[in-house]
Amino acid sequence: MNENIVNDTEVQNVEMTAGEMLRNARTTGRRKREIPTIAKQLCIREEFLQALEDGDYSVIPEPVYILGFARNYAMELGLNPDDVVAKIKREMGMATECAADADAADSGSCGTGGVPGGIVARAAIFVRKKWKWFAGAAVLLGALVVGIVILVASGRGDDAAQTPDVVVAETVQAVSEPAYSKTVRERFGTENRANARVILQAAQESWVKVEDARGNTVFSRVLVPGDVYYVPAAANHKATFGNAGGIDIWVDGVAAEKAGPAHTRQSGISLNPESLKPAAKSAPDTETAE
């Protein structure tokens, strides 16, 4: 009998929209809850949670916020966040199903972000059918590269007979990663990795926004545990954390103080390495949940 109930629930979830799944989980069962209560716990505006249940995604400013808020809301209600996020992506046209033909299934290609999966599947099929042509082209290209290398090397040999080589030692800065509290899952801002003095890592799921001195957003994303972001070396960057206690801050490989307690939103956090050190750190602005 329990197995029949589980199967009926799974079928019902498949037929429901993402908003219906969220509302059903909140209003049914033993633990019925109100939106204002959950909004305070998640530090998410009530109108945003209501918009998720209504399927009115135009109320929330950016897709990254929609998906991040939906994931947090689903976890709080005991739902599978991946199922809810996948439904929202389909409802917003951000994902399409794989091509139904056997070749597409064999290639394992799906369209994401509004790019038809059939295009990828057809490209894979074309390459597979014309592999001999591609292999021949690769051989010719390789022979051409080898010929160019030989010509260049012979020219340098003539010059070497007259002028000795001068070897210039290049100084390469070794990047020292801190002893993260979580195993690194994914890295962001890797273009700043070579000279980043400040590194952020999510110990808990949290929305992170980083702005430059002019107020321009240089990074905005919901980080899940293990995700790392390398802050640009330029001074006067500031950050906003949706869950301040869920973000570890590393300065020159040393752990700095948390920007605030868990499940609180903190804004105006200076990411200047000197200001993050204990002797000079100033308290950021704290915003209460609306």
Image (tube, rainbow, N blue to C red):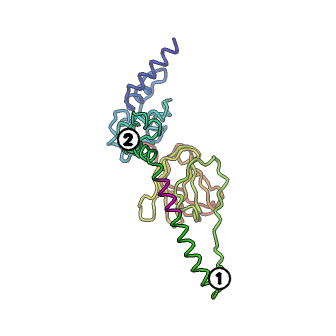
In the foreground, 93 or 165: 165
- Residue 255 is drawn in which quadrant? bottom right
- Residue 87 is drawn in which quadrant? top left
Q: Is residue 89 visible?
A: yes
Return the residue found at the far bottom: 162
Is residue 105 covered in magenta?
Answer: no
Of the residues shown, which amino acid type is indicated by label 2? Gly
In the foreground, 191 or 232: 191
Question: Distance between the Cα atoms at labels 2 and 1?
Answer: 54 Å
Q: Is residue 259 left or right of residue 25?
A: right
Q: Is residue 24 left or right of residue 256?
A: left
Residue visible at 64% across and 86% down? 161
Residue 267 at x, y percent in the picture: 48, 53
| Kind of element beneath mark 1 | loop
Numbered range of the magenta stretch: 134-142
Q: Are marks 2 and 1 in contact (CB under 8 Å)?
A: no
Which residue in the structure is indicated by mark 2? 118
Asked if residue 197 is positioned above or below residue 80 in the image, the reply reads below
Of the residues shown, which amino acid type is indicated by label 1? Asp
Which residue in the structure is indicated by mark 1? 165
Residue 219 at x, y percent in the picture: 46, 55
Is residue 140 covered in magenta?
Answer: yes
Residue 18 at x, y percent in the picture: 39, 32
Specify the label residue 250 is tagged with. none
